[in-house]
Image (spheres, rainbow, N blue to C red):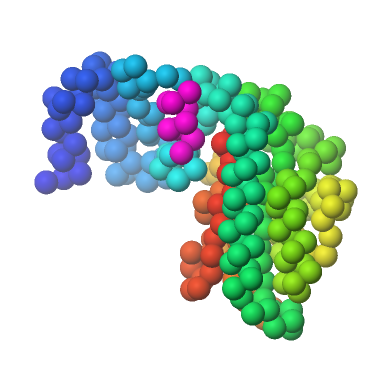
Amino acid sequence: MTLLGSFSQVRNSKLAKLFGNHYKAAYTRWAYCLRKDIATPSTFSHCFDLPPRLPGESVHDYCQSFHLNAEAGNILDWTLPVECVAYVRRYTTGPRYFEDMSFVAYQATRFSQSISVRGHGRDSWVFEVDETLLSNAAYFAKHNYGASLFNQTDFNIWVAQGKATAIVSMRTLYWKLIDAHWTVYLMSQRRTESQRAVTEKNLRDAGYKGWKKLFLQRSSRSFVTAVEDIRNPGNSDVYKKIEENGGIVHASVGSKRNMGTDSLPGSMSFKAPNAMY
């Protein structure tokens, strides 16, 4: 049975009856995209509709489920639904975000303490910059917390202002690593070398210093969109460069799932919360 054939039973399933025409329309678009993507896999991630709210499900509960699945990487190439802007605003500016971030920082701290750092400069840790060390919430607050179409030019203007603020729990983790003689590398998808100086100044102003190198990872793939750029800081080339210089990458922390350490045996990748993109 083909993949499309295996889905053909869905149209008349209990789910279709439960969700009605909306579900059938979503199935039709899914099947269309799946046929299209057999020929053009690069468009695959643009072809998934979000499911409708369950009968009686509140907007808050629906957005909480969306958030969970987005963080888990179960939604490809997602943009925040407009109906979830209020939820993400409350989450990002409220205590829960800071509690979740502190939880990640605690787990990362415990892991770092399990490694015997030898003090020769080889034991390395990689941080993502945006939404891990620095918060851009003030920028995204003016753009519906990610629900508005991402505009790279506007974001570049924000970067140039150097106003991103420190995420306190991550700054605490950062300094624990520095004090324990870890070699710290930074990774950012900020797009141009011209942004290096302002990014490094923003980091220093926010209370960071002592990192070994900041890698700017602008994608070389011409078909990658701006919104994909900001979501995808992970690149195994960074780790290859670190290893070529004698480094051993033990862990990374970032707000995106694809930080790239999956290919490094024995390493850990800590996922920082990010409900905006």
Instruction: Classify 169 as above or below 18.
Output: below
From the top left corner, tell me how far across and down residue 263 is, in percent. 48, 68
Is residue 265 shown left or right of residue 112?
left
- Left or right placement of residue 83 versus residue 165 in this view: left
Q: How many marks?
A: 0
Question: Relative to residue 116, is residue 264 depicted above or below?
Answer: above
Residue 152 placement, left or right of 68: right
**Magenta stretch: helix, strand or loop mostly:** helix
Check the image and report above or below for 277 versus 25: below
Residue 80 screen position, x and y as percent = 53, 29
Residue 14 drawn above or below residue 247: above
Is residue 152 or residue 23 the one in the foreground? 23
Task: Kindly identify the residue that appears in the image at 63 percent across and 46 percent down.
Answer: 101
Determine if residue 243 is in view: no
Q: Which residue is rendered at x = 75% and y = 47% of the image?
A: 168
Observer able to see residue 207: yes
Quarter of the image where the C terminus is located: top right
Determine if the magenta segment contains residue 66.
yes
Instruction: Write down the region rendered in magenta.
Output: 60-68
Q: Say which quarter of the image contains residue 250.
A: bottom right
Near-viewer residue (198 or 267): 267
Q: Is residue 65 magenta?
A: yes
The image position of residue 17, as x and y in percent, is 18, 20
Q: Give the residue drawn at x 66%, y 67%.
A: 125
Residue 204, given in percent of the width and then of the height, sits at 86, 53
Look at 65% across and 41% down and name the residue there: 98
In front of the other: 153 or 169: 169
